Amino acid sequence: MAALPLLPKSPRIEVVDALRGFAVMSIVLLHNIEHFDFYFFPETLPGWMKIVDGKIWETLFFLFGGKSYAIFALLFGFSFFIQFNNQEKKGADFSGRFLWRLFLLLGFGIFNSVFYQGDILGLYAVIGITLIPVRKWSDRAVLATALLFMLQPLEIAKIAGALSDPWYTSPGRMSDYYFGQTAAYLGGHSFLDLVKGNLVNGRLAVIHWSWENGRFFQASGLFMMGMLLGRRGMFVVTDSHRTFWTRALLASAVLFLPLYYLKLSLPGFVAREALLSPLSLIVTSWSNFAFMVVLVSSFVLLYQRRIAQRVLEYLAPFGRMSLTNYIVQSAIGSFIYYGYGIGLYQVTGATYCVVIAVALIALQLAFCHWWLTSHAQGPFERLWHRATWM
C-alpha cells in the first residue's frame, strides 16, 4: 500500500502557535529579571553593571511589559473560538464543556501558584467566563462590548466621582500591603512556608493588583477581540487579511506615539491624585494595547515572508506547549531565585537574569521539539485535554 501524503500544515495554526510561543518566551524574560516577583536589586554588583541592568530592565519592560500578557489573552479568546466553532459544526454546544475546562485551568493555576504567586492562569480561568454569554452575539455587539471593557469603566467612574466631588480621594492600594509581606516567605528557606505564602497572601496580592490595574476589564476585552479574530479567520493568509494587518500595524504605531507621550507627561499636567491615578491607568492600558497590536501585526506580516517564517516557525512547538512551558518555568525559576532553592535573587541583576532566562528558554525549546516528535501535545496540554473530554 502506498504511503499517504502528508497533509499541509495550517498557516493559521502555525502562526498562532509561533506567536503564542513568542509571547510566553517574552513572559519568561520578564519573570526572570523580576526574580519571579521578588524585587531585589543587589548592591554588591559593579557600578557599570547596575547601569546596564537598568537599561535592560527599561528596554524589556518597554517592549513586553503589559504586552506579552495581552498577546496571551488575545490568543486565549482565539482558541476559545476554535474550540467552540469545532463543536458547533458537530451540532454540540461547547459552553458547558468550556466552563469545565476553565475549572480545570483554575486547578492548573492553583498548582502553578505553589511555585509562583504571579500566576495568570487562575485569573484567565475566572475572566474566561465572560466569553460564554457573548459567544453567539453579532460581531458588532462583541466588538462594542470589548471596547467598553477596554475603556476601563471603573476608572471612568472614578474620574466622574473626582470631578463631581472635590473631596473625593482614590481608594488605597490593597495589593501594596500584601506584596509587602512576600519577602518573608520568598526569601525564606522553607518550601512549605513558600507554598502557604503563595497560596494565601500571594494570591490576594495578585487579585488585588489585577483589579487595581484594570486587568479584569482589559483581559475580558482582549478575550473577545481574540474571538473576533477567529471568527474572521484573520490568521489565514489572504490578500485582504494582509491588508488588514498592514493597516493595523500603521494605525497602532501612529496611536502608540501620542499615547506613550501622554502617559509620560500626565503627572506634569494633573496634580490631583484622585484624577491622575485613573487617567494614568486608562492611558497606560491603551498605550500597551497599541504596542501589543504593533507586535502582533508585525509578527503576522513577517511570518508571511519565507525567510522570516523559517526562523519564526521554530517557535511554534514552544507555543503548542505553552501551558507546560509556563508552569515549568515557574517551578524552575522559583528554585533558582527564591530562598528555599539556590537563592540567586541576592546576587543577580537584570543582566545575569537575562542570561539565565535565555538558557532556560533554549532548554525548554529543545525539549518541546524533542517531545513533539513522538507526542501530539505537551504533558500538561494532554492532561488538560483528556480531563476536558473525560
Image (cartoon, rainbow, N blue to C red):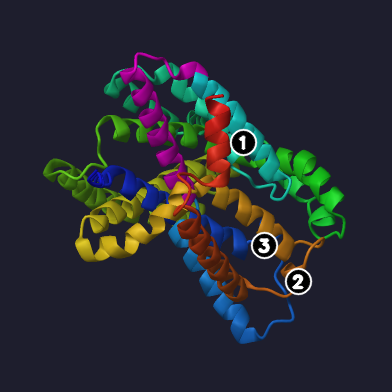
Q: Which amino acid does the dot numbered 1 rest on?
A: Gly
Residue 66 relative to residue 112: left or right: left
Q: Which amino acid does the dot numbered 2 rest on?
A: Gln
Q: Which mark is residue 286?
A: none
Q: Residues within 10 Å of mark 2 (few under 14, many from 20)?
A: some
Circles 3 and 1 in contact, beta carbons < 8 Å: no
Q: Which residue is mark 3?
A: 35
At 54% from the left and 62% from the top, the residue drawn is: 29
At 28% from the left and 29% from the top, the residue drawn is: 231
Q: Which residue is mark 2?
A: 346
Q: Is 95 included in the stretch rendered in magenta?
A: yes
Task: Give the magenta part as a residue range.
Answer: 67-96
Q: Which amino acid does the dot numbered 3 rest on?
A: His
Q: Which residue is mark 1?
A: 122
Q: Nearer the viewer, residue 58 or 16?
A: 16
Helix, strand or loop at label 2? It is helix
Q: Compared with residue 96, is residue 243 higher up or lower down, i.e. above or below?
A: below
Instruction: Quote the CA–CA distance across marks 3 and 1.
Output: 21 Å
Q: Is residue 379 visible?
A: yes
At 32% from the left and 48% from the top, the residue drawn is: 14
Q: Compared with residue 323, is residue 361 higher up or lower down, i.e. above or below?
A: below
Image coordinates for residue 192, horizontal then vertical, percent: 86, 49
Helix, strand or loop at label 3? It is loop
User: Where, by quadrant of the figure, is residue 228 drawn?
Assistant: top left
Q: Earlier in the sequence, mark 1 or mark 2?
A: 1
